[in-house]
Image (tube, rainbow, N blue to C red):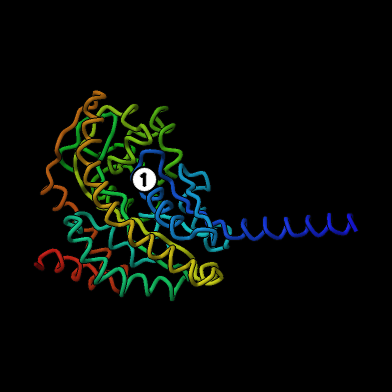
């Protein structure tokens, strides 16, 4: 009888343990501690877990612990990772997301809020889910991007000629910097610091939050304020894994992801000020680039996107019109 009770207790313990582990929900991203990605994910985890109680537990995995954006998105598709937060990489998942790779297309966060409501949610997210099975729960951000390098200040596109510049995976960023005269090299975020330190590449382009949290400013001499691309980040799941979660858990996760956005925008705006000071205090030479020169040099990218992506011209027009709307 005692042996029977012992085995019953063991089986009960194993069932409980399995149940808890089966409802552990992982969210993965490439952001280091102190980055906007990581701060956003931590805020989301806190909100979600406060509502989930014993139903499930969300765990944050940053610093590319679960792989590059490409690897994490594959894991989301396979169901071995529940949630990921890609930004630029989304243009390789569905071509319409390449619209956010167009230089200077997003004016500011107020503009991006309009784009989310009138372009991302009703058009891009819908088409993404129908074509790939990926589902966007919420739109966060990675910020406005700046250029750093070890050669010279970048004032106009011609200054980039011959500079080996790391860019994220996605053909439009490569095409953009080729048009500017640079030698762009796609590379996983986790490999960039060593490549900069060893001189394998001369520079890179990222928002302040990624530059400082990954300590790129410690191995770069110049930072040029270009704001050439605003990169939204997308909280992504795959519908097959997502639909297996209990309905009440799904509702809590989706609402927590959406409720995180105000925090993201506020934190991002604060970081633009505080992290630029971190860079200058470290001794990096900072200059403000000639925006008009970069805008003018970007025309070929818009024309190619409009030709290459079936809905490209319509998407660009709609987003630019929203920038003018009051």
Q: Quadrant of the C terminus?
A: bottom left
Q: Is residue 12 left or right of residue 234?
A: right
Residue at far front of view: 1
* Residue 101 found in image quarter: bottom left
What SS does tag 1 mark? Answer: helix
Location of residue 5 in the rendering, given as x and y in whole percent from the top left corner: 84, 58
In the picture of the structure, the residue carrying the numbered disc 1 is 39
Name the side, left or right, on which 169 lies relative to 298. right
Percent of width and height locating residue 205: 30, 42
Residue placed most toward the observer, 131 or 176: 131
Residue at 26% from the left image edge and 63% from the top image edge: 304
Q: Is residue 319 visible?
A: yes
- Residue shown at 10% from the left, 65% from the top: 324
Image: 31 above or below 81: above
The residue depicted at 45 percent of the width and 52 percent of the height is 69
**Residue at image location 15% in from the left, 67% down from the top:** 322
Q: Nearer the viewer, residue 258 or 97?
A: 258
Quadrant holding the N terminus: bottom right
Image location of residue 126, percent across then percent down:
37, 74
Is any part of residue 74 visible from this angle?
no
């Amino acid at each position: 009888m005692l042996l029977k009770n012992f085995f019953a207790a063991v089986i009960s313990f194993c069932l409980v343990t399995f149940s808890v582990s089966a409802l552990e929900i992982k969210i993965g991203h490439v952001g280091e501690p102190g980055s906007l990605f990581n701060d956003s994910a931590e805020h989301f985890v806190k909100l979600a877990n406060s509502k989930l109680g014993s139903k499930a537990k969300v765990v944050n995995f940053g610093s590319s612990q679960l792989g590059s954006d490409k690897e994490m998105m594959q894991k989301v598709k396979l169901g071995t990772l529940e949630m990921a937060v890609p930004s630029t990489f989304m243009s390789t998942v569905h071509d319409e997301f390449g619209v956010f790779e167009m230089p200077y297309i997003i004016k500011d966060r107020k503009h991006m809020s309009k784009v989310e409501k009138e372009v991302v949610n009703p058009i891009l997210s819908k088409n993404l889910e129908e074509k790939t099975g990926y589902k966007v729960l919420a739109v966060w951000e990675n910020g406005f991007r700046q250029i750093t390098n070890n050669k010279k200040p970048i004032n106009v596109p011609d200054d980039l000629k011959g500079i080996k510049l790391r860019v994220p995976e996605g053909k439009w960023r490569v095409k953009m910097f080729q048009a500017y005269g640079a030698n762009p090299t796609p590379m996983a975020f986790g490999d960039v610091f060593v490549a900069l330190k060893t001189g394998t590449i001369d520079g890179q382009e990222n928002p302040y939050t990624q530059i400082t949290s990954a300590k790129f400013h410690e191995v770069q001499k110049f930072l040029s304020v270009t704001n050439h691309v605003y990169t939204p980040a997308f909280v992504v799941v795959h519908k097959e894994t997502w639909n297996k979660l209990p309905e009440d858990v799904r509702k809590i996760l989706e609402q927590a992801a959406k409720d995180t956005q105000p925090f993201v925008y506020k934190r991002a705006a604060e970081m633009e000020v505080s992290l630029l000071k971190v860079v200058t205090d470290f001794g990096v030479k900072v200059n403000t680039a000639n925006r008009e020169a970069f805008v003018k040099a970007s025309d070929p990218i818009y024309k190619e996107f409009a030709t290459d992506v079936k809905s490209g011209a319509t998407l660009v027009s709609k987003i630019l019109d929203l920038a003018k709307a009051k």
